[in-house]
Image: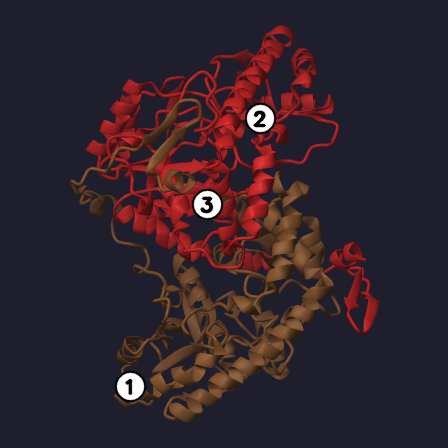
Chain colours: A red, B brown
């Protein structure tokens, strides 16, 4: 009966009775008038990302951006949620900047000579909302922002939604060439650079220490912000993250860290660390956008990351990600040798693979899909035209026993 | 130890040891360079609303926009959260449009000849994020939007953040004069009207059925949208809500319904109901802004509203709100007769009271605060200059035993 009620089929009024709801009429409505009211969209019409498509249950899935459920600290998460359900946070409003204890935790995670204060860490509901707020608050519509290419499609989407003009610089396995970044700032007058210096999505690239220092110098020299999206902070395999925010002492680095991928996609909790007036600008945007983040989710997230089991979880995840990466890499090299993985990522969730020149990447993706394998075309990761036919393969979502099969399908699709 | 870890004072590495973290240096950082990088803010710098200020624990508080904890269905909420913690939703990603069962519930709540389909109900994390998305997606920067005056400050804030130009029309206890709405559309070419037809915040006004029909006719004639913010749907006292969305069959009404105030401020769950291309435009904005809403919160919210205890809760809340409203009204009339409550609200959480002409409303609010009573100046509820010295008094947040004391402080502050 509760299911029927939830589905809107029956309506139950205690003390009165249960009623079947009226059926929907079948005349189609005419929404043509909305064409004039809505006008053309400001940015190109964006559907959902290929990474978010729902695949058939038996399909092999290497397209999504999330790790498999068995990589998550499920018991910690469920126990933390049950505990949080009993606290004040379940029935009270959280402060706009976040629960002070969680702010303190995010701040304490930044190592370096000048650690941020808890006040500088603003709790947000996932890093996507941080991106849109940062771009709106620090850059603004019609203004230029430097960005790596390829880079996270969600950042490209957030920038487009904020009306920001993207200025792409190429980025390789060691990060961008600082001279390219310098030229981009000098020619456009940009005041911000969005980047993923650690295990970048999609390539897994990690900036060298020299590149980091040089880029930070360029950013400082131009009186600009470096928006450091440390999305894979807890996803290191062969290397450890060394976030640039640790070298920042005067507010040039705006730092993003999310728990969504390592705690649970349902615990939408992340933080922006920003100092000075930039912090206030971002907080004002967040407050206007959403007022505050559910205190229950914040309390549960803090519970998880302060349990002794959290460090154990991170160590286990590291091993599992490494094993998965190597298995998928082997499957690709054995069964689809023409699919070239240029750079073995030292962390993150993905392989970034290049198809032979001239391959139609969309046709290749469709050919894989027809054979039961869902992957994401690389197109979405380029702020401008793609520089080659790439695909992204997530090794963290699908069961590794199926990787050889995935390799065979990739090889088979390449031959046809 | 977990508290010390959370506060960032010590750092614990299992198997290695526990370390006291380095103390922060005391040299102040210089953020002066950010002045040039940030430029002037696009909208006037907005701090937090007066309704969101944190008052001293012993202060009498009539300023906030939320009901007291003892008005909430606390047991239902906690039990629902514990149950949700055990479901799939705790460890999986929710679809961008929301959990299908919750979409169906929101859609089923709309009565009328042409009920919306579950697909038309988009789940969002609280109504504030719905407002910003609707204004961005359907109106856009630099475009006009008609709005009641006074009206909800959060909508004014969301419109400013979206760069929308506000076109205020006066609104009284029966709603706006349809001729004023017609003139506002005709002279500005606006394509949207934001309104709260049921128990408006702050006045408690409820549009008459004739006003609703006439305004809907105006909106249709101008090929425009009515953004119906049904924030007080479950907060009726002497009257029941009759949302205009029930009369909509061709997508002119964009409907907002939130559960935050009647379930729990921590269950940030609301819905936008929109039909036609407008629905897709809003969903694309939400996806770019935040990807999806925590499935755990959605599952818990659905659990609460489909329990038999939910209807009991709504009946109890109605009685309590009525008793509280009458008590505060009596206290004001007895002890502060010069504070004029023009309209006794048939629902909602607030009294909207007018001070004698010429009163400095900010000085009055400060005088109350000095005497231990926190109230909100009416200024924030006006899209333009206030038309008189008003204050908003929330009767749902403070303990009713203290209402006589509040009345005496109001009277005392008025005399000085």
CA gap, disc 3 and disc 2: 24 Å
Q: Are marks 1 and 2 on the same chain?
A: no
Q: Quadrant of the C terminus of chain A?
A: top right
SS for dot 2 = strand
Give residue A377's mark: 2
> Mark 3 = which residue?
A129
Please, which chain is the residue tagged with disc 2 on? A
Q: Are marks 1 and 3 on the same chain?
A: no
Mark closest to the chain's N terminus, 3 or 2:
3
Give residue B246's mark: none
Q: Residue at x 49, y 74 (%)?
A: B201
CA gap, disc 1 and disc 2: 65 Å
* Residue A267 horizontal side relative to residue B29, left or right: right
Residue B335 picture location, percent across and down: 39, 91
Residue A153 picture location, percent across and down: 49, 33
Q: Nearer the viewer, mark 1 or mark 2?
A: 1
CB atoms of marks 1 and 3 within 8 Å: no
* Residue B295 horizontal side relative to residue A252, left or right: right
- Answer few, some or many: residues within 10 Å of disc 1's Cα (few below 14, many 20 plus, some between 14 and 19): some
> Mark 1 = which residue?
B359
The answer to whether residue B98 shows anywhere in this view is no
Q: Compared to B402, does A242 lie above or below?
A: above
Q: Are marks 3 and 2 on the same chain?
A: yes
SS for dot 1 = loop
Q: Residue at x 33, y 39 (%)?
A: A144
Closer-to-camera residue (A336/A77) = A77
Which residue is most to the left? Answer: B27
Residue A186 picture location, percent across and down: 24, 31
């Amino acid at each position: 009966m509760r299911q029927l009620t939830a589905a809107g089929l029956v309506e139950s009024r205690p003390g009165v009775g249960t009623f079947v709801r009226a059926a929907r009429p079948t005349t189609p409505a005419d929404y043509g008038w909305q064409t004039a009211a809505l006008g053309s969209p400001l940015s190109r019409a964006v559907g959902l990302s290929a990474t978010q498509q729902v695949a058939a249950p038996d399909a092999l899935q290497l397209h999504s951006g999330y790790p498999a459920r068995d990589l998550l600290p499920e018991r910690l998460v469920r126990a933390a949620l049950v505990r949080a359900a009993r606290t004040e946070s379940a029935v009270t409003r959280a402060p706009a900047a976040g629960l002070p204890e969680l702010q303190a935790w995010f701040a304490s995670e930044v190592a370096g000579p000048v650690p941020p204060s808890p006040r500088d860490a603003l709790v947000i509901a996932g890093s996507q909302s941080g991106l849109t707020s940062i771009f709106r608050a620090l850059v603004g519509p019609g203004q230029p922002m430097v960005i790596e290419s390829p880079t996270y499609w969600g950042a490209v989407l957030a920038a487009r939604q904020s009306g920001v003009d993207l200025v792409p610089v190429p980025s390789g396995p060691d990060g961008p060439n600082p001279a390219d970044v310098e030229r981009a700032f000098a020619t456009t007058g940009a005041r911000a650079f969005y980047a993923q210096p650690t295990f970048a999505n999609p390539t897994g690239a990690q900036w060298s220490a020299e590149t980091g220092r040089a880029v930070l110098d360029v950013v400082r020299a131009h009186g600009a912000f470096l928006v450091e999206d440390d999305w894979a902070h807890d996803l290191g395999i062969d290397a450890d993250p060394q976030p640039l925010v640790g070298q920042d002492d005067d507010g040039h680095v705006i730092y993003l860290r999310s728990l969504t991928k390592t705690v649970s996609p349902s615990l939408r909790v992340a933080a922006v660390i920003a100092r000075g007036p930039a912090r206030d600008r971002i907080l004002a945007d967040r407050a206007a956008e959403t007022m505050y983040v559910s205190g229950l989710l914040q309390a549960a997230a803090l519970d998880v990351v302060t349990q002794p089991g959290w460090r154990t979880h991170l160590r286990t995840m590291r091993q599992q990600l490494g094993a998965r990466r190597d298995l998928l890499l082997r499957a690709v090299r054995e069964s689809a040798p023409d699919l070239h993985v240029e750079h073995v990522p030292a962390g993150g969730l993905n392989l970034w693979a290049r198809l032979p020149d001239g391959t139609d990447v969309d046709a290749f993706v469709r050919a894989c899909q027809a054979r039961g394998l869902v992957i994401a075309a690389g197109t979405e990761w380029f702020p401008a035209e793609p520089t080659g036919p790439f695909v992204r393969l997530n090794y963290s979502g699908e069961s590794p026993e199926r990787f050889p099969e995935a390799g065979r399908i990739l090889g088979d699709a390449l031959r046809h």
